Image: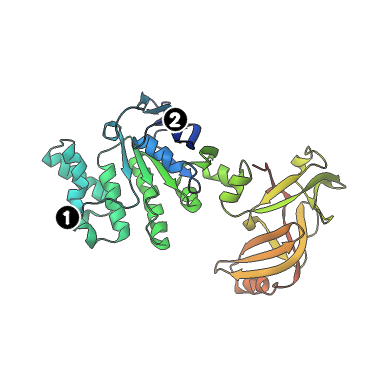
């Protein structure tokens, strides 16, 4: 397949169920070898998109191409894709090896080649030593890896993963995120991964499409999505965000955001072109915010006064919630020493300042 030919291409894809529009004129191009994540809340269209690619539901209008071939009318078994589901769908009466071999045998692959490929992909997922066990003799994470090996053994051009980690506990889910990313790097198959968990998407994907109401709200790398959200929805959905609303104006040291209380919060110099007097919203991530009794001196800091109403010790960091004239502002501060944690803990119910570098302020559309 030519390098510039997408593994998957949707062109003005729409899916309706009666009067309900599940997918609304969506176009996307997924390059070969990407780990592409469809991310969003329930009902946003991400699973519908996956089902369209897999051939489980038909398009209402638009076009779907896989490796350059238009596949709108092709049934699932004739598309060069395979799917891993959340419930694994393993055959309980078959051994691990037999489960992985099943698809190859249905395709007419012969004995020695079947055995060779089964061993290859079980070794890839770290389960070769357990090939003779039944699924019920495995942990949830091991069953997930069997399902992954069974899907990959057929060497599809595209692997579809429908919230495959949703049934696992938190610790195991994080372990499987690392495993999936490693396996993807080794096989270089195009992965299309559906999740509502932003942490999964940020930790594994090479590119993310954040979906909302059947459309793509923003598409980009994890870093772009996190640090340059396109609008309020994306900023609010990805990670945790503080939002400070006000009206831009020019202060003596540069542009400022005037709050309803009359406080002035410094803005980045690059925002000097914002229309004076119009409503604007600044977003800043909690890890960029510091908190204390007094802010640092000098320009370049956005500062708001308030009262600390919550201090939560979380082991490697402390989370401080401050009520300000702009609403609640959260600071998440790491600490390598106990004394730092104790100092932050002493701020509860105190009048404090929260501050951040104006370079960390992001002016966002209301969206």
How many numbered marks appear? 2
Q: Is residue 361 visible?
A: no
Secondary element at image label 1: loop
Task: Please tell me which residue is depicted at 75% across the width and 40% down the height of the picture.
Answer: 270
Q: State which tag comes first along the sequence, 2 or 1.
A: 2
Residue 348 placement (x, y as % from top left): 69, 73
Q: Which part of the image, by quadrant, shows the N terminus?
A: top left
Question: What residue appears at the point 16 percent right and 56 percent down from the top-left corner?
Answer: 132
| Name of the residue lying farthest toward the left | 111
Can you identify the residue that label 1 sits on? 93
Side (left or right) of 363 relative to 252: left
Alpha carbon of mark 2 to alpha carbon of mark 1: how far? 39 Å
Task: Using the image, determine if residue 91 lies above or below residue 354.
Answer: above
Residue 83 can be seen in this image: yes
From the viewer's perspective, is residue 41 above or below residue 49?
below
Left or right of residue 111, residue 197 in this image: right
Residue 100 x/y as whole percent: 22, 47
Q: Residue at x 76, y 44 (%)?
A: 279
Query: Residue 162 at what x, y percent from top left?
Result: 38, 46
Using the image as rendered, state which of residue 127 and residue 137 is in the foreground. 137
Q: Which residue is mark 2?
A: 10
Q: Secondary structure at mark 2?
A: strand
Q: Residues within 10 Å of mark 1 (few under 14, many from 20)?
A: few
């Amino acid at each position: 397949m030519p390098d510039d030919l997408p593994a998957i291409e949707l062109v003005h894809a729409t899916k309706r169920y009666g009067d309900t529009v599940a997918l609304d004129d969506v176009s996307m191009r997924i390059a070969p070898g990407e780990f592409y994540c469809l991310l969003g809340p329930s009902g946003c269209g991400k699973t519908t998109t996956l089902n369209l690619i897999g051939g489980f539901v038909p398009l209402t209008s638009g076009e779907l191409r896989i490796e350059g071939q238009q596949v709108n009318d092709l049934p699932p078994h004739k598309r060069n894709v395979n799917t891993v589901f959340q419930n694994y769908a393993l055959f309980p009466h078959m051994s691990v090896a037999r489960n992985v071999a099943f698809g190859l045998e249905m395709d007419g692959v012969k004995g020695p080649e079947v055995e060779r490929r089964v061993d290859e992909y079980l070794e890839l997922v770290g389960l070769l030593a357990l090939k003779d066990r039944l699924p019920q003799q495995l942990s949830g994470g091991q069953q997930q890896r069997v399902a992954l090996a069974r899907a990959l053994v057929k060497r599809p051009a595209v692997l579809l993963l429908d919230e495959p980690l949703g049934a696992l506990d938190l610790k195991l889910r994080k372990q499987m995120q690392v495993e999936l990313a490693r396996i993807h790097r080794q096989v270089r198959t195009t992965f299309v991964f559906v999740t509502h968990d932003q942490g999964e998407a940020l930790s594994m994907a090479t590119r993310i499409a954040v979906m909302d109401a059947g459309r793509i709200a923003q598409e980009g790398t994890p870093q772009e999505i996190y640090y340059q959200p396109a609008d309020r929805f994306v900023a609010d959905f990805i990670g945790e965000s503080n939002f400070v609303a006000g009206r831009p104006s020019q202060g003596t040291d540069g542009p400022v955001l005037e709050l309803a209380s009359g406080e002035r919060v410094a803005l980045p110099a690059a925002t000097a072109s914002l229309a004076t007097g119009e409503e604007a919203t600044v977003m800043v991530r909690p890890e960029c915010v510091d908190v204390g009794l007094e802010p640092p001196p000098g320009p370049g800091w956005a500062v708001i006064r308030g009262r600390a109403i919550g201090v939560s010790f979380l082991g490697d960091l402390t989370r401080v919630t401050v009520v300000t004239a702009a609403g609640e502002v959260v600071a998440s501060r790491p600490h390598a020493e106990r004394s730092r944690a104790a100092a932050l803990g002493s701020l509860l119910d105190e009048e404090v300042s929260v501050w951040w570098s104006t370079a960390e302020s992001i002016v966002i559309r209301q969206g």
